[in-house]
Image (cartoon, rainbow, N blue to C red):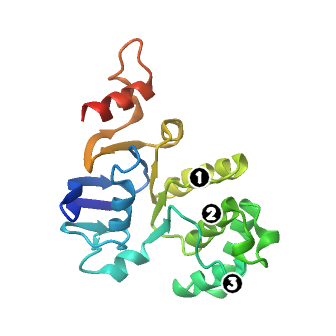
């Protein structure tokens, strides 16, 4: 479970997140929607402890990211918005590095690396350097690394970008399976179609304010007869 309590963040005189309250429950896929610059990535960086919180607190399975950051981060797996990290390592070196950090045992890591690498069609590329990977392959090696320690809370920042259709399908199925096992899946996107097909609930943020939380079906109930979901989304953003 992820619980965001009265969280605010400013850069200089500009407030980018304003007194945000939000709970993402276990077993739930929660989509975080909003235009570019709405505050989605800032919130994800605060959830994961990358950015400091000016006001409020965020709890990961009841562990405060401020007061008990190590314990909180043990229960987080993050797919960042850019996959360009550890480029000088081979894929397998990166995965073993991540497994060492999270103290994944030898037998378990071998099995998890094999299973996930086969699922995302990466097993034959593990001996190559990440710098030689395409954008989509870099994204997939990070996804594999994040899931090695089976974190209770899986957080993804625009995860679809750069993936081929099969990888997108495999990622969606993995997200569904992960939530069905009682874990929390929280991801940001600006693609309404993805959120509609995948999410149990969505939150819409604009200018650092949460303007809607609920199911897609509840959101559709706000539609006029001649209005599309995309038009309603734009209407909510523009009227905020």
Disc with the residue nearer the chain's start (1 vs 3): 3
On the question of residue 14 being in view, the answer is yes
Element type where label 3 sits in the image: helix
Disc with the residue nearer the chain's start (2 vs 3): 3
Extreme-right residue of the structure: 124
Extreme-top residue of the structure: 225
Quadrant hosting residue 218: top left
Q: Quadrant of the N terminus?
A: bottom left
Q: Residue at x 57, y 87 (%)?
A: 100
In the rendered image, residue 163, in percent from the top left (x then y), is placed at 66, 53
**Residue tagged 1:** 161
Q: Is residue 209 left or right of residue 120?
A: left
- Which disc is residue 93 wearing? 3
How many C-alpha atoms fall within 10 Å of the one at disc 1: few (<14), some, or many (≥20)? Answer: some
Q: Are marks 2 and 1 in contact (CB under 8 Å)?
A: yes
Q: Residue at x 69, y 53 (%)?
A: 167
Q: Nearer the viewer, residue 1 or 225?
A: 225
Q: How far apart are the alpha carbons under marks 1 and 3? A: 24 Å
Check the image and report above or below for 170 versus 233. Answer: below
Check the image and report above or below for 232 versus 153. Answer: above
Q: How far apart are the alpha carbons under marks 2 and 1? A: 9 Å
Check the image and report above or below for 222 versus 76. Answer: above
Q: How far apart are the alpha carbons under marks 2 and 3? A: 16 Å
Q: Are marks 1 and 3 in contact (CB under 8 Å)?
A: no
In the rendered image, residue 148, in percent from the top left (x then y), is placed at 59, 74
Disc with the residue nearer the chain's start (2 vs 1): 2
Q: Are marks 2 and 3 in contact (CB under 8 Å)?
A: no
In the rendered image, residue 14, in percent from the top left (x then y), is placed at 21, 58
How many C-alpha atoms fall within 10 Å of the one at disc 2: few (<14), some, or many (≥20)? Answer: many
**Residue tagged 2:** 139
Quadrant hosting residue 233: top left
Q: Quadrant of the C terminus?
A: top left
């Amino acid at each position: 479970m992820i619980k965001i309590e009265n969280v605010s963040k400013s850069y200089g005189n500009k407030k980018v997140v304003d007194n945000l309250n939000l709970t993402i429950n276990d077993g739930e896929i929660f989509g975080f929607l909003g235009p570019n610059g709405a505050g989605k990535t800032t919130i994800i960086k605060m959830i994961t402890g990358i950015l400091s919180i000016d006001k409020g607190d965020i709890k990961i399975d009841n562990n405060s990211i401020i007061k008990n950051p190590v314990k909180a981060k043990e229960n987080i797996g993050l797919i960042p918005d850019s996959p360009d990290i550890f480029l000088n390592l081979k894929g397998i070196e990166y995965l073993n590095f991540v497994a060492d950090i999270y103290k994944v045992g030898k037998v378990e890591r071998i099995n998890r690396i094999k299973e996930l690498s086969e699922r995302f069609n990466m097993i034959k590329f593990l001996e190559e350097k990440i710098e030689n990977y395409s954008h989509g392959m870099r994204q997939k090696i990070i996804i594999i690394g994040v899931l090695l320690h089976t974190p209770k809370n899986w957080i993804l920042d625009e995860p679809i970008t750069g993936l081929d259709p099969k990888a997108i399908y495999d990622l969606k199925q993995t997200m569904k399976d992960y939530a069905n096992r009682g874990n929390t899946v929280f991801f940001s996107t600006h693609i309404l179609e993805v959120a509609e097909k995948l999410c149990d609930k969505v939150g819409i943020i604009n200018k650092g304010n949460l303007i809607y939380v609920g199911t897609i079906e509840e959101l559709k109930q706000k539609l006029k007869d001649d209005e599309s979901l995309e038009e309603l989304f734009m209407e909510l953003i523009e009227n905020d």
